[in-house]
Amino acid sequence: MVLEINTALKFCGINPIGQSIDFKRHITFRNQLPDDRFEYNTPNKYTNEIILEKLINQNPKIKNILKELNLPVKINQTNLHNLLDNHCKDVQEITMGIAENLPFSLQTKVNKKSLKNAAYLHDIGKILIPDEILNKQGKLNEYETKIMHKHSELGYEILKNTDLDKKTLNMIRNHHQNAKKSGYPFVTKDFRADLDLQILTMADKYSALTEKRPYKEAYTPQQALTIIYSDVKDGKLHPFVFKALTNYVEKIKEANPQIV
């Protein structure tokens, strides 16, 4: 694929700031879950069904969001495991691949820990999206789309009272936003799509496009890159991040020639 990017788009958004195992560590989710102990320090600790139930029950805003959508508070753990084992792991791998293919001056500004955690947990809000919407065979109607668009905000609300850092939480909330603020959920005028968020957004979109979903077949890497490049031309994503993605994809293709 020939890229003709002569000038970097002017984004005030590209202005970013900048696991060890801990046995017997006593994790307290901001003093709200003092009895839960974990023997590892990975994002998996936030995906346990018992912990998720506690986090959801302790945040009344989650119930209010679902009430406005006429939805019950119902956890779909099977869907969550499917997402974590497939899409989320894929997004996590792609984000790291993009980060490693950035110019060195930008690589040093990536918060890899926050980015890796956000990539793995970015779709956790889908645990509250009804299966008939999440896995619908066909296009969503307006009401269903409104529900689906709430998953990023729900993910943020589920995890905001944990010990995840603010940067990770904001990436989970805003992984469908962009430098032009035309995504979702709503953001204020001082919102900036920084480097880490743009990496996550691009990785998520590339993964989604190249996956087979109930409502579509998988796109080829070339097709997916072409679609994402339209977002670059529209000013939603930075060309340096896109170039890093294309370099990563080319390396994957070189290692696996059978990939079209």
Image (tube, rainbow, N blue to C red):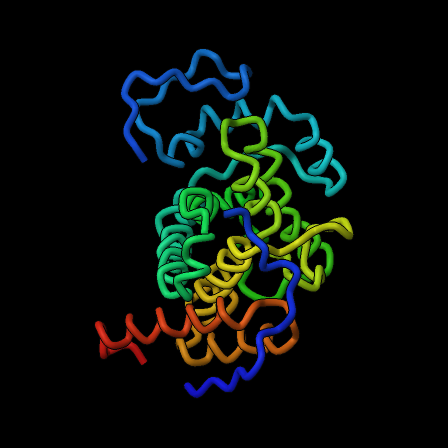
Using the image, determine if residue 252 lies above or below residue 122: below
- Report the side of 1 relative to 22 (left or right): right
Q: Please identify the quarter of the rendering in which residue 139 is found.
A: bottom right
- Report the side of 205 relative to 19 (left or right): right
Residue 220 seen in this snapshot: yes
On the image, the x and y values in percent for residue 115 come to 45, 48
Which residue, as the protein is rendered here, is positioned at the far top? 35
Q: Residue at x 58, y 80 (%)?
A: 7
Give the tally of numbered discs.
Answer: 0
On the image, the x and y values in percent for residue 29 come to 51, 21
Residue 130 seen in this snapshot: no
On the image, the x and y values in percent for residue 126 come to 54, 45
The N terminus, quarter of image:
bottom left
Q: Residue at x 37, y 73 (%)?
A: 247
Q: Residue at x 42, y 51 (%)?
A: 88
On the image, the x and y values in percent for residue 213 come to 46, 63
Q: Residue at x 58, y 67 (%)?
A: 237
Which residue, as the protein is rendered here, is positioned at the far front? 105
**Viewer-proximal residue among 105 and 248:** 105
The C terminus, quarter of image:
bottom left
- Report the side of 57 relative to 245 (left or right): right
